[in-house]
Image: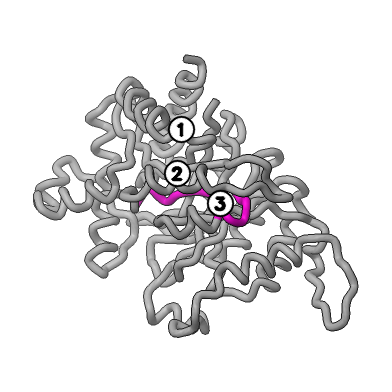
Amino acid sequence: MTAYSILDLSPIVEGSTAAVSLQNSLTLAQHAEKIGYTRYWVAEHHNMPGVASAATSVVIGHIAGGTSSIRVGAGGVMLPNHSPLVIAEHFGTLATLYPNRIDLGLGRAPGTDGAAARALRRSLTHSDQFPDDIIELQQYFQEYKPSSGSVRAVPGEGTKVPLWILGSSLYGAQLAAHLGLPFAFASHFAPDALAQAAQIYREYFQPSAQLAEPYFMFAVNVFAADSDEEAQFIRSSHQQGFANLRSGSPSLLPHPVNDIEAVLGSATLASVNHSLRCVASGGPEKVYRELTELIQTHRPNEIIINSPIHKHEARLHSYSIAAEVVRDINQV
């Protein structure tokens, strides 16, 4: 059985606002809860006009407060941008308000450009402290043990918020295996190392207090509609937005177009599609074939679905079709 979840950057679309995007995220989470999605994750990005989830823990509170059972979390928090104590307090508070529903996925990248990283007071020159920061964060979530000079996360201590390692390279796979944590691979934009990362993670996994066996999830872009043609149309927003990001001009999520090659050009479109090739796009039958191939190839415990679609109603419909498809795959 493959679980299925949602990755949401709360996209701000052309012609709309951040306020509408955040409300749409809540509506999508409520819809997802009804149709069997396991978790709903939002991601930290900065200095991007088309992303409304920069204050990730705040958005998680918004989503968790409007739902009742679906797990809600970060996919992820970029830990080098923050003090582990502050993150422990934020997510400890969330776990106190919404017990047994909060996840904390941790990334190593800045989630932004150099200028915004400096504005976040992040040093771009210090040695990599990511593994040490994770261990410090884990300690804050454990039961408090008094010792000289010890620091407490209140709320936070004793909540044992489950940690995940996120990654788009072999480094994340190795670290997750070493620490005995679940691993989520960012194949929705960086699929090159997906197969090797999954293999390394499973081969070198060491059981931990949190996790006895490897738990692997990868991200896939899904654009599902009633027809293949309609799916290609709604997918074109993501292709344009990714091309804008790659060119150094991040934008609002563009309106979809009928002829994406005419807009981007064949060379740019080929490059974009190569980076976004972990995808299932089409009507229900085509999405079934493509998701089946991805799941059979990489054998995940769970997939997390990214569907940045301009029209909110089309996005809801795409996630409904995707849920039906994964349920059908699980019955085979």
Question: On the rendered structure, is 216 left or right of 169?
Answer: right
Which residue is the site of mark 1?
299
Of the numbered discs in the image, which one, if any, rests on residue 328? Answer: none
- The answer to whether residue 301 is above or below residue 62 is above
Residue 254: x, y in percent? 28, 54
Q: Nearer the viewer, residue 27 or 157?
A: 157
What element does badge 1 sit on?
Answer: loop
Q: Is residue 3 above or below residue 181?
A: above
- Answer with left or right where residue 100 lies relative to residue 78: right
In front here: 42 or 88? 88
Percent x, y of residue 173: 48, 53
Taking the magenta stretch, the answer to whether it contains residue 240 is no
Q: Which residue is mark 2?
A: 198
What residue is shown with label 3? 177
Judging from the image, what secondary structure is the residue with disc 3 in?
Answer: helix
**Mark 2 residue element:** helix
How far apart are the two marked residues, 1 and 2, measured between alpha carbons? 9 Å
Q: How many marks?
A: 3
Quarter assignment of residue 113: bottom left
Which badge, 2 or 3, comes first in the chain's sequence? 3
Q: Amino acid at mark 3?
A: Ala
Q: Residue at x 66, y 56 (%)?
A: 61
Q: Are marks 1 and 2 in contact (CB under 8 Å)?
A: yes
Q: On the rendered image, what quadrant is the N terminus found in? A: top right
> Considering only order in the chain, which callout, 2 or 1, is on the residue closer to the N terminus?
2
Q: What amino acid type is highlighted by mark number 2?
A: Ala
Per the rendered image, the range of residues in magenta is 176-189
The residue located at (49%, 66%) in the rendering is 108
Q: Residue 65, can we see it? A: no
Outermost residue, top side? 332
Q: Is residue 302 visible?
A: yes
Task: Give neighbour class at mark 1: few <14, some 14-19, many 20+ (Cα, 10 Å).
Answer: some
